[in-house]
Amino acid sequence: MAKKFKNIHFTEKIALFYLRCKGYRLLKKNFTVKNGTGAGEIDLVMKKGKTIIFIEVKKRKTYLQAAEAIDMNNQLRVVKSSAVFLKKYPHFQNFNVRYDAVLFKDKSFWPKHLKDAWRVL
């Protein structure tokens, strides 16, 4: 079990545990797309029912600052990475897609889960 969490940040471990307790199933952690694509890394890719959830985990001094850290550029990188994920794993193409955020504030390990934190227009 220790190998499973080797390259994952502590807050991501807590977020993963929290979401698994809520019935989410982990598909990928730290899904990374090659440089030069305008994409980047998705902290957690999870599934619940027929929905694939791409999750950004942020920790800042306050929950508000953590939420603000997921700016338009960050959102765009996650969206581009999610498109690569769906192309790489075509059996998920017919699933609903959602973008969530799990926020942490300093000196607290209690997460705030923002379902549908942003949408692709």
Image (spheres, helix red, strand yellow):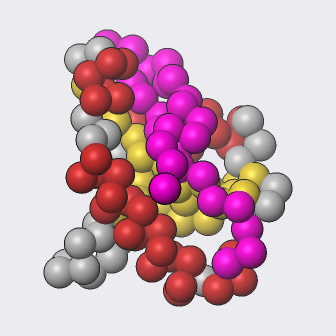
Magenta segment boundaries in residue numbering: 93-121
Q: Residue at x 38, y 59 (%)?
A: 78
**Which sits in the foreground, 83 or 107?**
83
Q: Is residue 33 above or below residue 31?
A: below
Q: Residue at x 31, y 40 (%)?
A: 70
In the image: residue 64, left or right of residue 14: left
Q: Is residue 59 visible?
A: no
Q: Is residue 31 above or below residue 109?
A: below
Q: Residue at x 53, y 43 (%)?
A: 100
Residue placed farthest to the left in the image? 36
In the image: residue 75, left or right of residue 47: left
Quarter of the image where one finds residue 59: top left
* The magenta stretch spans residue 94: yes
Quarter of the image where one finds residue 90: bottom right
Horizontal and vertical percent position of residue 71: 27, 41
Q: Quadrant of the N terminus?
A: bottom right
Q: Residue at x 75, y 53 (%)?
A: 48
Horizontal and vertical percent position of residue 97: 63, 59
* The magenta stretch spans residue 67: no
Q: Is residue 58 visible?
A: yes
**Which sits in the foreground, 25 or 38?**
38
Horizontal and vertical percent position of residue 86: 56, 77
Residue placed farthest to the front in the image? 121
Horizontal and vertical percent position of residue 83: 48, 74
